[in-house]
Image: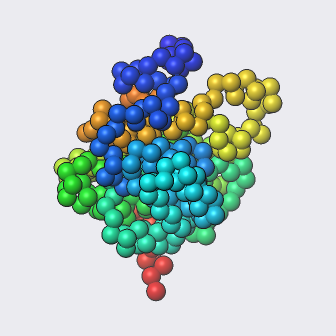
Amino acid sequence: MKETLRYLAGIAGPSGYGSKSTAEQVTANCSYSSHLTAIITGGTSGIGAETARVLAKRGVRVVIPARDLIRAAEVKEGIQRDNPKAEVIVLEIDLSSFASVKRFCSDFLALGLPLNILINNAGIFSQTLEYSEDKIEMTFATNYLGHYLLTEMLLEKMVETAAQTGVQGRIINVSSVIHSWVKRDTFRFNDLLTPKSYNGTRAYSQSKLATILHAKEIARQLKTRNARVTINAVHPGIVKTGIIRAHKSFITDSVFFMASKLLKSVSQGASTTCYVALSPQTEGVNGKYFVDCNESSCSPLANDESEARKLWKQTRALIHRRLCHLKP
């Protein structure tokens, strides 16, 4: 109840920010951002587009991987209309496709740019069971597996950039509070790939649990290496975006109307991502879970180090097996 009242009132936490803080407010004092490069998935709409806009406003070179290149070009135009000096690069990607993620990484690395920030923000919600071109359930393929591969293929560039510049690299996995809905006995890797029965909300929550476990394991590995790169997970809040509209069919119109009054604006929803990406207060913070721009607690399952390690190993084996098949 205390946390609910804090959220509704927008009371600031230890960071000085809370549920009502906007992305621009939490980055207002981030003065060192003008020499940074960030990749932001899902940057063509919702909190991803707002994150791209605000980071570009703070002087960050923004790379937007996109499946819809026309929409990405519109976002780029809008950012540069407001900030003519903004540098925005658009490259093609389909996160549900291992081959496409691999091509994107090759295209980005060929540019010879540094990489300081990776924001794994893109997410889909599907009411019906669909499969990717790799024959994997679409929500899990897009929300988790695509970002796992993206992170794996770009991590050495981030470590290299941090070592060369002395500026800590930051990876942010955008998760959701509904990761806590997942029960341990339903979180089985093979069932996530090809479910025997399908429920859209369950698939979404499982993919978001996986993104936290991914952050926990990569954080452990980075600490072991003493690398100057951190990774954290964030819950943006319940935001007025396309995913919420997709969820609407599961609840009554009256409940949706009442719930909508509690939803965050897109700028409020992007605030936690931008805070963790740029704030001096999050320097050195690694393997944590943030809500409303403050460290918070995730579920016991999301905190399970052995579960995180197991998922990472299973995912790595799957992806490397599939990538071998892609080689000519």
Q: Position of residue 62 (x, y in %)?
A: 44, 55
How many marks the image carries: the answer is 0
Above or below, comparing residue 172 to residue 316 in the picture: above
Lateral position of residue 105 relative to residue 93, left or right? left
Above or below, comparing residue 281 to residue 7 in the picture: below
Tell me the quarter of the picture where residue 280 sits.
top left
Q: Nearer the viewer, residue 89 or 199?
A: 89
Quadrant containing the N terminus is top right
Q: Position of residue 217 (x, y in %)?
A: 34, 48
Q: Nearer the viewer, residue 290 or 261?
A: 261
Above or below, comparing residue 4 to residue 90 in the picture: above
Above or below, comparing residue 257 to residue 204 in the picture: above
Q: Is residue 172 visible?
A: no
Lateral position of residue 79 relative to residue 154, left or right? right
Q: Position of residue 193 (x, y in %)?
A: 56, 58
Instruction: Tell me what residue is drawn at x 65 percent, y 41 percent.
Output: 241
Indicate how the structure is coloured in the image: rainbow
Instruction: Tell me what residue is drawn at x 40 percent, y 62 percent.
Output: 316
Q: Is residue 112 visible?
A: yes
Q: Position of residue 226 (x, y in %)?
A: 18, 49
Farthest residue in the right direction?
A: 253
Lateral position of residue 258 relative to residue 272, left or right? right
